Image (tube, rainbow, N blue to C red):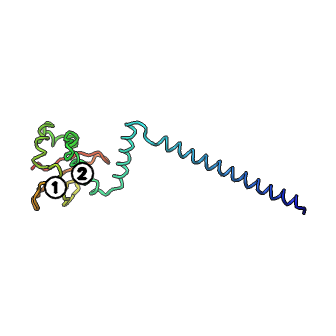
């Protein structure tokens, strides 16, 4: 075989390899573009979409949690509202009959809060029991800033979980 035929065969092999590489790169770029388009479509754009996206992620996380962990999370949400001064949000988490009996107005709830809860409340979860769709948590509350060692209050918190991240609660009014 002559040198020119060998060079042509080598040239054709290189050409075939180049064509195959171009096809593979085109396929990879197409896949990458389609992934980016899907990510762009699924990423939240407006404030409502961001809130819905966050809500969905919280719900997914709660679905993977044990019951006790979910209930402790809900207590944390309630106390977080209180500690940050968002009393209206905390008030909306209260069970309707409980509100009617103990705190018929937001103002009555706001007056009560400082008598039991502090700006930084430390809680220790003692026990939890479930009765149907209602959970009872026994906790010890301590003022994390001004409290003295051993100065704790016992409290029961009752949580009714309607669905993941959809709950109401009440507590033993001290």
Task: Report whether 107 appears left or right of 58.
Answer: left
- Residue at 43 percent across and 38 percent down: it is 45
Residue under numbered circle 1: 144
**Up/down of 37 relative to 120, above or below:** above
Q: Position of residue 138 (x, y in %)?
A: 17, 57
| Position above or below: 24 against 92 | below
Question: Where does label 2 land, which residue?
Answer: 76
Q: Which residue is drawn at 9% across and 47% down?
A: 115
Say left or right for 172 vs 59: left
Q: Is residue 63 left or right of residue 43?
A: left
State the residue lying farthest toward the right: 2
Quarter occupied by residue 64: bottom left
Camera-side residue of 114 and 56: 114
Q: Which residue occupies the foreground of this view, 77 or 144?
A: 144
Tag 1's secondary structure?
loop
Residue 10 visible, this orientation: yes
Residue at 17% across / 47% down in the picture? 170
Q: Does residue 101 appear in this view?
A: no
Mark 2–mark 1 Cα distance, whole angstroms, equals 15 Å
Which of the numbered marks, if any, corresponds to residue 113?
none
Density class for disc 2 (Cα within 10 Å; few <14, some 14-19, many ≥20) is: few
Instruction: For the residues labelled 2 and 1, say whether their Cβ atoms are less than 8 Å apart.
Output: no
Pick whichever, 114 or 108, lies toward us.
114
């Amino acid at each position: 075989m002559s040198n020119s035929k060998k060079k042509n065969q080598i040239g054709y092999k290189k050409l075939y390899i180049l064509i195959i590489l171009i096809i593979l790169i085109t396929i990879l770029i197409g896949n990458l573009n389609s992934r980016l388009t899907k990510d762009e479509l699924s990423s939240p754009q407006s404030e409502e979409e961001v809130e819905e996206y966050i809500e969905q992620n919280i719900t997914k996380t709660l679905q993977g949690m044990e019951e006790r962990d979910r209930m402790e999370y809900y207590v944390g949400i309630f106390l977080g509202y209180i500690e940050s001064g968002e009393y209206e949000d905390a008030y909306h988490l209260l069970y309707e009959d409980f509100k009617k009996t103990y705190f018929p107005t937001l103002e009555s709830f706001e007056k009560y809060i400082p008598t039991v809860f502090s700006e930084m409340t430390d809680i220790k979860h003692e026990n939890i029991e479930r009765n149907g769709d209602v959970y009872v948590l026994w906790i010890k509350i301590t003022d994390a800033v001004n409290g003295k060692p051993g100065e704790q209050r016992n409290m029961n918190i009752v949580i009714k979980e309607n669905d993941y991240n959809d709950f109401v609660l009440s507590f033993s009014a001290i």
